[in-house]
Amino acid sequence: MERFALVNIGGDWMIDILVAEDNAEMGELLCDFVHGEGYSVAVCADGESALALFSREGAKLVILDIMLPGVDGFAVCSAIRESSDTPILMVSARIAKDDKLNGLLLGADDYIEKPYDIDILLAKIKGIFNRRYHSDVLSDGFLKIDRSKRVAYKNGNALELRQKEFELLLLLVENSGKTLSKDYLFDRIWGVDSFSEQQTLTVHIKWLRQKIESDPKNPKHILTVWGVGYRYER
């Protein structure tokens, strides 16, 4: 059985992270943490479902348990490697050296022992996405954002952005096409311990629209998803 969260299918999109985990509670927990970091995620409870979903939709990263019913994690890893270089993180309670070597030799990028520290796993995920899918310059033809110089350009012209405006715009563009909740955006930009109020987010969205939209009152790029948050569209 497959469980999906914020999976955008069709066009140029694919699932960010595919998790193959037969422990329902662990799969649900991992899904919630990964989803909370802004990634789209799908969870499959067995190897056959994971392969079917990967074949159908693809994924930017696969987190793969070894001890899956039916087709085990080693077989799933081997099958994926026949046609894809998608990063694979193996997670397992099997900690024998032979198991680790087998996973790595089959093409896994890393092998993580259970129980794992969720912060360490999330850091590994972020590292993979930064190395594999992010460069210093992010461009969609309309906006160009230079992460290292912390400068954004609209149609080649530099935008005058405050620090938080830049960080908010970057987060939205990095998650282009995804709806991000107000709570998520506020926590990522201002921090959960911030003394600012969430209205600050609304004000910064207004400022960004004034700087990047042709008609800020009828935005085409920074869209409001009522009752949820905001989404950036190219």
Image (cartoon, rainbow, N blue to C red):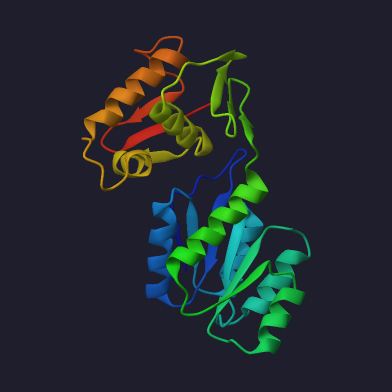
Residue 211 % position (x, y):
44, 14
Residue 215 % position (x, y):
41, 9
**Residue at (63, 90) in percent of width and height:** 96
Between residues 129 and 35, which one lies in front from this camera angle? 129
Tell me the quadrant of the picture where the C terminus can be found. Answer: top right
- 72 above or below 190? below
Q: Can residue 123 be seen here?
A: yes
**Residue at (34, 28) in percent of width and height:** 224
Between residues 9 and 81, which one lies in front from this camera angle? 81
Residue 192 % position (x, y):
28, 48
Residue 208 % position (x, y):
40, 20
- 196 above or below 210? below
Count of numbered circles in the view: 0
**Residue at (54, 74) in percent of width and height:** 46
- 117 above or below 185? below
- 179 above or below 62? above
Which quadrant of the figure has residue 4? Answer: bottom left
Q: Can residue 155 be seen here?
A: no
Between residues 16 and 163, which one lies in front from this camera angle? 163
Residue sitting at the far top? 215
